[in-house]
Image: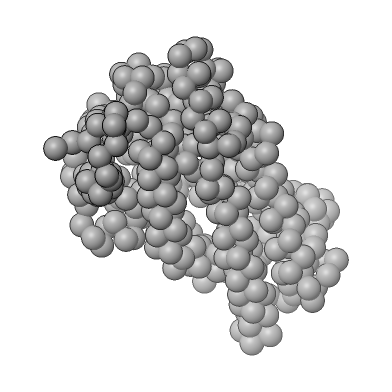
Amino acid sequence: MRRYNRLRRRISIADFLLGLALLMVLLATGWTARLRDLAYLSAGQIYVLAVFFYVFMLTVLNKLLGFGLDYYGFRLEHRFQLSTQTRRSWARDQVKGWLVGLVIGSVLVELVYAIIRAAPRLWWLIAWAAFIVLFVFFAQIAPVVLSPLFYKFKALENEGLKQRLLRLSERAGTRVKGVYEWKLSEKSRKANAALAGLGSTRRIILADTLLEKYTDDEIEAILAHELGHHVHRHIPKSILIQAGFTFVGFWSANQVLHYAIERLHLFEQLADFANLPLLMLVSALLSLLLLPLLNAYSRSNERQADLYSYTSIPSILPFISGMNKLADQNLAERQPSRLVELLFHSHPPIAKRIQAAEAWARNQLPVAGRQSPA
Ligand SMILES: [Zn+2]
């Protein structure tokens, strides 16, 4: 379990560093200007098309460079018997993932440079506003457009569970738009559940691997946790926080670009898209700095959702047994070091989640019908 998690962590760190290295090499060697010239040439000097070709080449380079690590990650899941995915299906997912990245990446980059050309002084402010609209848009379409590219979903059929969720959400004074079964077993042996979407696409998704092996009481506890995210409006709040960070990001990017143009004379103008690696570098470094903060925020949301879960079901026992099952099934680290938790974990360690539930139950006055562990 420790070894698996250590290796997973190393893969994601190496992947991040590799991406960073690519951007720095492009900038330091001036190859970004050659890529731009190549893009212009292939695009017949049409700016918008050239931007697209440039993004295309960048995503290809990035994919090729990270391919070894991606494949190692795939092998790792198999080595620890966590994956059921064939090599062919994995390869298909890689191509799809690259295509989705290319489409979303081109839209964002085209937008940024169109805004830079139209409003060179206030571009960073306008681009920030446009990105927020896009965040909301992507959060909304993700469960109906993006996720189905990789997994199958269908409405939950278990009538008993559906009734339980309805009762839970009625008590919460809210309505969830749907509960879906997520066919995770085609690719993985892990179990998972999530709240996804926004507005009319908001839904709870439950992996079939979870529905198979957990008791109805345990699934209800997990549903209640997801409902807790919903009741506390965690998705809109996260978008707001993201908006704050993106504001800082665009402001810094503007400063850095001006410095690179006016002081270092690396580029002639803002609209020269050869400066894209610099923009990406600013955003990557800022994300790295903010990651511990974002993770801390996410952990506090998870604690809130946990609390909501065991206060809205009759007993904390299925919450605890569900947590234990999840930890075993997903090879989760029950008690990572404090440092690892602070830097990498978006969820509190399972050991702490269980301790919190037990502490809460101990502090409750004995209520008729409520079971609590001795
Ligand atoms: Zn959660």
The residue lying at 25 percent from left, 62 percent from top is: 339
Residue 205 shows in the view: no
Q: Nearer the viewer, residue 170 or 332?
A: 170
Taking the image as shown, residue 49 lies to the left or right of residue 65, namely: right
Picture quadrant where residue 176 is located: top right
Identify whether 90 is placed above or below 347. above
The N terminus is located in which quarter? top left
Taking the image as shown, residue 172 lies to the left or right of residue 145, namely: left
Furthest residue toward bottom:
263
Picture quadrant where residue 217 is located: top left
Residue 274 shows in the view: yes
The residue lying at 46 percent from left, 65 percent from top is: 290
Q: Position of residue 337 (x, y in %)?
A: 20, 57
Q: Nearer the viewer, residue 156 or 346?
A: 156
Furthest residue toward right:
118
Q: Position of residue 229 (x, y in %)?
A: 49, 43
Taking the image as shown, residue 229 lies to the left or right of residue 215, namely: right
Identify whether 327 is placed above or below 63. above
Q: Nearer the viewer, residue 366 or 234?
A: 366
Q: Nearer the viewer, residue 271 or 282?
A: 282
The C terminus is located in which quarter? top left
Q: How is the image coloured?
A: one colour
